[in-house]
């Protein structure tokens, strides 16, 4: 549904889309107002619905539901590139996830980018403005006999995990350059602010 402008008095509400579901909970509209993503948490068939406006009517194009077995509660999208990048919060009652899609069509694959902790849940999801001057950190890795040497610049904290998508934890007292033995378990590294 939508209002015209910012009403200051009673105004009729215009119905834009009827998803036909009692489980729709959030939406994201592109800047041209001709594409809407709707979060639907209907178990088994829910996901992120893509609705397109053809100039006279709104039509459901498809539903993104890979990695969303319980559907989704929240959705947001980045419309700045050639294909929208859509983010969704899954609908589990505990320990839900944030999933990212590059919307290339109905078969787009979702990638889990964050997991809520034990007895925790994500509630809501929005993108904020990006700083144009923010330079992403560069982490370089050099092989050495029996070790790898990690180097970076700036005030970043080194983190490691035994799984590339797993839980990353700070490496205690790590400063650049940091030497890590390769004789132990496999590790993945990243930097955080």
Image: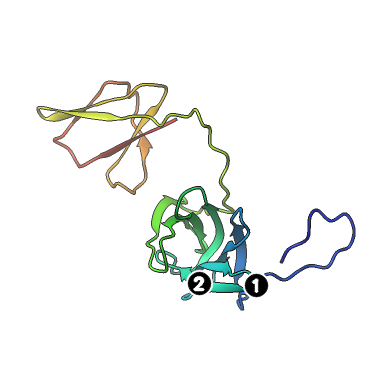
Q: Residue at x 55, y 54 (%)?
A: 76
Residue 40 visible to the viewer: no
> Up-down: is 71 above or below 155?
below
Q: Position of residue 51 (x, y in %)?
A: 56, 68
Q: Residue furthest right?
A: 9
Q: Residue at x 40, y 66 (%)?
A: 66
Does residue 120 sit above or below 17 in this rendering? above
> For the residue labelled by badge 1, is the local secondary structure a helix, a strand or a loop?
loop
- Residue 56 tag number: 1
Residue 7 visible here: yes
In the displayed image of the protein, which residue is found farthest to the left? 145
Q: Position of residue 145 (x, y in %)?
A: 9, 27
Q: Earlier in the sequence, mark 2 or mark 1?
A: 1
Occupied quadrant, residue 5: bottom right
Q: Is residue 99 above or below residue 190?
A: below
Residue 115, numbered label = none
Q: Which residue is at a point 18% across and 29% down the rendered structure image?
A: 148
- Pinpoint residue 124: horizontal percent, then vertical percent: 59, 53
Q: Nearer the viewer, residue 174 or 2?
A: 2
Q: Residues within 10 Å of mark 2 (few under 14, many from 20)?
A: few
State how far apart marks 2 and 1 are (Cα). Answer: 15 Å
Q: Secondary structure at mark 2?
A: strand
Q: Mark 1: give few (<14), some (14-19) or many (20+) Cα within 10 Å.
A: few
Quadrant containing the C terminus in the rendered view: top left
Q: Nearer the viewer, mark 2 or mark 1?
A: 1
Q: Position of residue 176 (x, y in %)?
A: 30, 21
**Residue at 44% over, 60% down:** 103
Left or right relative to 99: residue 171:
left
In the displayed image of the protein, which residue is found farthest to the bottom?
Answer: 20
| Residue 1: quadrant of the picture | bottom right
Which residue does the numbered mark 2 point to in the structure image?
Answer: 61
Circles 2, 1 touching at the beta carbon (< 8 Å):
no
């Amino acid at each position: 549904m939508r209002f015209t402008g910012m009403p200051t008095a009673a105004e009729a509400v215009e119905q834009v889309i009827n998803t036909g579901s009692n489980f729709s909970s959030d939406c994201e509209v592109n800047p041209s107002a001709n594409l809407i993503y709707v979060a639907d948490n209907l178990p088994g068939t829910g996901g992120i619905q893509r609705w397109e406006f053809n100039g006279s009517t709104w039509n459901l194009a498809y539903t993104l539901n890979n990695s969303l077995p319980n559907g989704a509660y929240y959705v947001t999208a980045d419309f700045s590139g050639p294909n929208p990048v859509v983010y969704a919060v899954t609908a589990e009652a505990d320990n839900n996830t944030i999933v990212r899609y590059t919307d290339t069509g109905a078969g787009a694959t979702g990638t889990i980018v964050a997991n809520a902790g034990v007895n925790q849940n994500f509630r809501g999801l929005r993108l904020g403005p990006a700083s144009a001057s923010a330079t992403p950190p560069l982490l370089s890795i050099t092989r050495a006999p029996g070790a790898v040497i990690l180097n970076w610049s700036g005030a970043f904290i080194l983190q490691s995990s035994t799984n590339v998508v797993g839980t990353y934890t700070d490496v205690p007292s790590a400063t650049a350059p940091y030497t890590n033995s390769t004789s132990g378990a496999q590790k993945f590294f990243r930097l955080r602010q």
